[in-house]
Amino acid sequence: MFDKKPHVLVLGGNFAGLACAQKIRHYLGDAARITVIDKKSYLLYIPNISSDVFEDRNPALHQRLDIVPVLAREDIDFIHGEVTGVDVDKRTVTFVPAERGGAEAHVEAYDYVVFALGNRLAFDRIEGFVDFGHTVTDIYHGEKLRQYLKREYRGGPIAIGSARFHQGDGADGLVPYPGGSIPRALAACEGPPVEVMMSMATWLKDNDKGEPNKITVFTPGKMIAEDAGEEVVKQLLDLATRMGLNYWHDTQDITRLTAEGIEFADGRFLQAELKIIFPDWRAHDFLKGLPVSDSEGFIRTNLCMQNPDYPEVFACGDCAAVTVPKLGAIGHQQSDIVGLQLGKAFGKVDPEKADQPLKPEVLCIGDMGDGKAFWIHSNSWFGGDIQKLKLGRVPYFLKMRYRDLFFANDGKIPAWGLDAAEMIAER
């Protein structure tokens, strides 16, 4: 028999979900019962998968954090189950236990719910991907690419880029900075394609497979990685041009992958033996049509991550409509806001402290190979005035050590962690 404390249910246990649960416990103390539901019992550390691939390591051995003991140490319950439905009027969540096939459906009630479910990576909507495509978005595909590079790659042309992102209208009208907005994006997140093109160029050199001019990076938008800001992108493209990399923009979308290359919606065809693809990021099907969802199924919130019509509903990370681009650093910013807002609701945090709306910042460290990385810090896409790019060995060191600190500290980054990383990288 559970106690009578209010129940906070966190849907999802990767970066956003784990951080939200920990922040809620931090601000609420023992005032609530907290439960996390996720279909997997570990956190997948996605940012370093590509580094493992290009440095010939199996990512399954390095990029998973068991979240069950991590949550237990903070008296947070965990349900190993796949969420299949949410009734926001009845305040219930339906899930199926995920350990064995054929499990029955269960219902969990909540007083407050945080949607942190991430999204579906829509590879199944790309014709030909299963036969001819590769990616680095998860452990399976990362290891598949690593083995392909070792055993099958014949030295032909390489294409790296994004399918079109279908954003939804849930963030329209929000103003994070004076005169700014949450823009509409044609690609969900393009730090990874930039990272992979740089790392791929180094891999070709290190493995005597040719020059960077074999590589073409492409985007459905007018400019790749537009969230980084025009000045930063110009510097990155100038570097790519000096390296010999090729660049296509305005491809609109991927129509089909074939053995010979990629057909684009704008009518062009890009010849490629190796095709590394970043897909459309779709909302989970069961979220579409909910009264808290937008036109594409992402969860509508204000800039304090709270749904305007259902005040007991919050969202964080990639499933939130306001999260554009779909970037872990923005989810990290949002997790603290959710914790503060629930702290206010429970009378544990002063409203003046809690009501600090999201001011999204792009913070991205991308591996370039050869022990180097790029560091991007920008908010100009949203109406701010920051655009910074740093290159070299220090950002690479920070990228690797950030992961180590994350794992060693149960997924928590000390309050000084990001500020210290920024200071080191930028100075």
Image: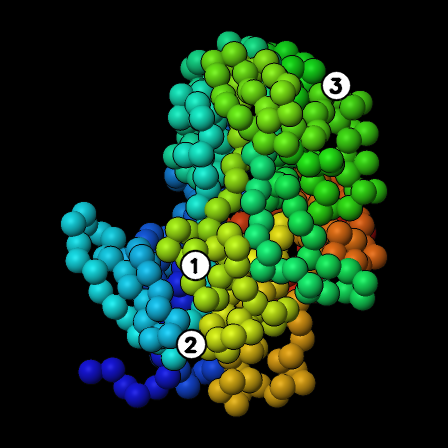
Taking the spot 71% from the left edge, 25% from the top edge, the residue there is 247
Disc 3 to disc 1, how far (Cα)?
47 Å
Residue 377 vs residue 224, the one in the foreground: 224
Residue farthest to the bottom, as pictured = 347
Q: Which residue is mark 3?
A: 244
Which element is circle 1 on?
loop
Answer with mark 2 or mark 1, whichever residue precedes in sequence: 2
| Quadrant that contains the N terminus | bottom left
Q: Amino acid at mark 1?
A: Gly
Taking the spot 81% from the left edge, 63% from the top edge, the residue there is 179
How packed mark 3 is, by other alpha carbons closer than 10 Å (few <14, some 14-19, many 20 or more), is: some
Label of residue 223 in the image: none
Disc 3 to disc 2, how far (Cα)?
52 Å
Using the image, determine if residue 184 lies above or below residue 249: below
Q: Residue 153, position in %: x, y? A: 49, 14
Q: Amino acid at mark 3?
A: Gly
Q: Which residue is mark 2?
A: 112
Q: Which residue is mark 1?
A: 289
Which element is circle 3 on?
loop
Residues at circles 3 and 1 in contact by the CB criterion of under 8 Å: no
Q: Residue 348, position in %: x, y? A: 53, 88
How packed mark 2 is, by other alpha carbons closer than 10 Å (few <14, some 14-19, many 20 or more), is: many
Taking the spot 37% from the left edge, 55% from the top edge, the residue there is 286
Nearest to the eye among marks 2 and 1: give it.
Answer: 1
Q: Residue 180, position in %: x, y? A: 77, 60
Nearest to the eye among marks 3 and 1: give it.
Answer: 1
Side of 297 relative to 237 (left or right): left
Side of 9 relative to 100 (left or right): right
